[in-house]
Image: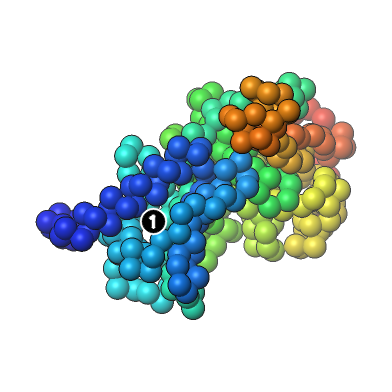
Amino acid sequence: MWRHRVRSAREEDAEQLLRRLLDGALALGASDVHLQPLGEAVDVRYRVDGELREGQALAPGEWRRVVAVLRLLAGLDLLDGLHPQDGLLCVSGYTWRVALLPCVQGEKVTLRRQGGLPDRLESLGLESEVVGGVRSLLEGCGLLAITGPASSGKTTTLYTLLREVVAAGKSAISVEDPVEQVIPGVTQVQVRTRAGFGFLAAMRAALRHDPRVLAIGEVRDEESTRAAVRSALGGHLVLCTLHAGAAGEAVERLVEMGATRRQVAVALCGILEQRLVRKPCPSCQGAGCSSCGGRGWQGLRALARLVRGLPYAGHVCADGQRGDVRHDQG
Ligand SMILES: [Zn+2]
């Protein structure tokens, strides 16, 4: 096997280089590392608190060796340079999700650090009323949609909710495309649309395993909408992420993607509308100092508001937990 053969000095060298890149990322507290070939050199950028910062560029020769060793260590296909690939890389006790994209300049690589997921909603920085409201919805059923623009922390909130669910001893299954991070205790299913295993098929299969909570990451087309709305109408608690600017837009998005207004009204138990905002630097409180690089802020927190489903939007839960029910025939 490749993994167990003796590595050459060149590979050792490339591995050292990769380690240096990732150690640099950790030292900055970066969540992602972007490596982008630009012809003459390879651009290295680190995402810190949502902003990209320039790192030291790599020479093309170094780059080829780093990509080769990345493929090896992340278990990617060593010869396939034509298709995008994903894998996991474990270096110095940290796990990184590796995504490789063939482009005309070479191969773009993005590494995202795994782990460090909060285990409680409070750790996201949410207000206590919002946390209380969301927790009460976790006791009921229906569709709870986490909305916000791209990179607003929706998936982190979804994963934190799932961590709370399993910590409370309840079973949870998530159906995702892609699974962004492995959450201990949650059964996570990767959808494979091209293989005929889409959101509907995955949710149907998941329901046979009798989960207390289902999750969809993310609802983005007709099929995933149907899967989410149907399961919620069937009396399950369904958590999902949904790309929408505001709570009202979320309803419109679901309707655009094939749900009827009546279905949405009955299925939705809540919309958690979220943004990420900068936290003032704890050392200087916004004035700018050396620990925040003069920016005055450090780190991000979630800012969210919870819109609860309308009172008439109740439905019969599988375990009959919610009382505000208007059960229509047909
Ligand atoms: Zn400061």
Q: Is residue 262 above or below residue 81?
A: above
Residue 95 image offset from top left, x and y in percent: 39, 43
Callout 1: 10 Å neighbours few (<14), some, many (20+)? some
CB at disc 1 and ligand 1 closer than 8 Å? no
- The outermost residue toward the left is 6
Residue at x-position 80% and y-position 62%: 256
Q: Nearer the viewer, residue 195 or 279?
A: 279
Residue position for label 1: 87
Q: Is residue 145 visible?
A: no
Image-based side of 216 in relation to 249, left or right: left
Q: Which picture quadrant has residue 128?
A: top right
Q: Position of residue 85 (x, y in %)?
A: 42, 65
Q: Quadrant of residue 80?
A: bottom left
Q: Position of residue 260 (x, y in %)?
A: 82, 57
Where is residue 191 drawn, in percent x and y? 50, 58
The residue located at (64%, 58%) in the rendering is 224
Is there any visible trace of residue 255 in the rendered image? yes
Quarter of the image for the N terminus: give it: bottom left
Q: Quadrant of residue 13?
A: bottom left
Which structural element holds mark 1?
Answer: strand
Closer to the camera in the image, 240 or 181? 181
Figure check: 45 above or below 37? above
**Residue name at image x 49 percent, y 78 percent:** 104
Image: 112 above or below 298: below
